[in-house]
Image (cartoon, rainbow, N blue to C red):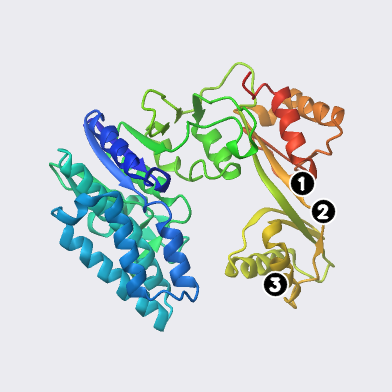
Amino acid sequence: MNIHVHKFGGSCLSAVEDIDAIVERVRESDGQAIVVVSAFRGITDRLLEQIDYESPTSNTAFTASIELEHIERIPEIATSPWCIRFADTLHHLSNCLDSHQELPDIDVRADALACGERLSSLAIAAALDARGIPAIPAWSEDIGIRLIGRGEDARINANLTKQSLQLPAGSVPVITGWYGATNSGYALLGRGGSDLTAAAVAAAVDASSVTIWRDVEGVLALSPQWTLPARNLSNLSYTEASELALFSQPMLHPSAVEPLREPGIPLNLRPLHNPDDHGTIIGPSIRLESPTVRAVGCIPRQVPFSWSLSSAISLTECVTDAMSALGRARIRVSSIRAHPGRVRLLISSRMAARARRILSGKPSLPTPEMGAPVSILCFVGEGIGSDSAIQEKIESHAKLSGIDLQYSDQEERDHAIHATVPAKQTEEALRTLCTALDLLSQ
């Protein structure tokens, strides 16, 4: 069958004109359309704030404000076939918030957060149905999307999902992204997890394509956050896209391409309000005759934490203790290097002071040394990791500009080159090296 999966994230669920555009993109879809949605923009952040902080707003009043926000964007939900289910979902949300407030529970928390996607599914189905496109809400727990794990770091059980998936026939299913059912309740897929839901569904139904609609153009050779005129990339390989996603958030969930790789299903990143722009297509590798840097990713302002270990301290135990302590505090480690007698972690400068307190309080660990902040650069392109000429070119232009670029000594990757520069030289390094590598538009 000619099946096309369309994913609409929170950035495409911001205003009435976004809803109109979503309806048109589904109407224009070839063959059978499947829709995957995130929560409306800002809803998940509001839910997190209500759950994790002592808000002066009662849960009842908070839930009423969530209801109003959805009705303002999609008034049709109030008179749709799912108006009762919409009200029941809001009531369920309020009960979850009350339960978690009385006795915090990881499963109840996930259930409450998933209500953002459930409400979005009901509202988008109502909008499509009201405009002549038969649609039906399809919640993850009802259609068979199965996850492994708990809390916010679960992963999709691809085999069980493929076996269990049952989509409603005769209408466009509007599937909830980001969460799924587990053996004990519900769990979440982490930031950008709706991309994973769309890819897993596409693989399960052997779709012809996946399109992730966004509020920006396709993928640029350099993230827009750096305000440099980077080139648009018409295509990327699965491997290039996955690598770049790790260093260029929020481009795409880094694991979103994995379910698509074996069946070879193409993934498109396209701008919602400009359907004539084909954006960026991600698919199987197309090796060029001469390896070329296609894009540069950057994780800025990372603080090095390092330890010198005596022979009495186990390297493995040191790394395990540090990572466990930081993981419990939800502090992300951007890079780790471990050698006999030496360990180095890179942690965002925003989390550095907190990380130091946690690590210094571990009696099993030596007191960490903190270095000057650096930024991680990731040069992406099939075959560049084994091409010494490209590495020499990057290093040469950095030296000519007085940029202190240091290559990472981690395991070589065929499709990427990793390096660091002092944080204060980040913008200069990106401008100089992107110019030298012809990644900026004219």
Q: Quadrant of the C terminus?
A: top right
User: SS of the residue at dot 1?
Assistant: helix
Give the residue at mark 1: 423
Q: Which mark is residue 432?
A: none
Q: How many marks?
A: 3
Task: Kindly indicate the quadrant of the structure image that contains residue 319.
Answer: bottom right
Q: Which residue type carries mark 3?
A: Ile
Mark 1, residues whose alpha carbon is within 10 Å: few (<14), some, or many (≥20)? some
Q: Which residue type carries mark 2?
A: Ala
Mark 2, residues whose alpha carbon is within 10 Å: few (<14), some, or many (≥20)? few
Task: Kindly indicate the quadrant of the structure image that contains residue 29.
Answer: top left
Q: Do residues under tags 2 and 1 come within 8 Å of each other at their CB atoms?
A: yes
Q: Position of residue 7 (x, y in %)?
A: 35, 42
Q: How far apart are the two marked residues, 2 and 3, measured between alpha carbons?
A: 19 Å
Q: Position of residue 123 (x, y in %)?
A: 25, 52
Q: Nearer the viewer, residue 310 or 306?
A: 306
Would you say 57 lies left or right of 431 here?
Answer: left
Please report the residue visible at 58 percent of the width from the left and 36 percent of the height from the top. 224
Q: How far apart are the two marked residues, 3 and 1, measured between alpha carbons?
A: 24 Å
Q: Nearer the viewer, residue 199 or 39?
A: 39
Give the residue at mark 3: 358
Give the residue at mark 2: 372
Q: In this view, which residue lies farthest toward the top?
A: 289
Foreground tag (2 vs 3)? 2
Q: Do residues under tags 3 and 1 come within 8 Å of each other at their CB atoms?
A: no
Q: How far apart are the two marked residues, 2 and 1, measured between alpha carbons?
A: 8 Å
124 above or below 207? Answer: below
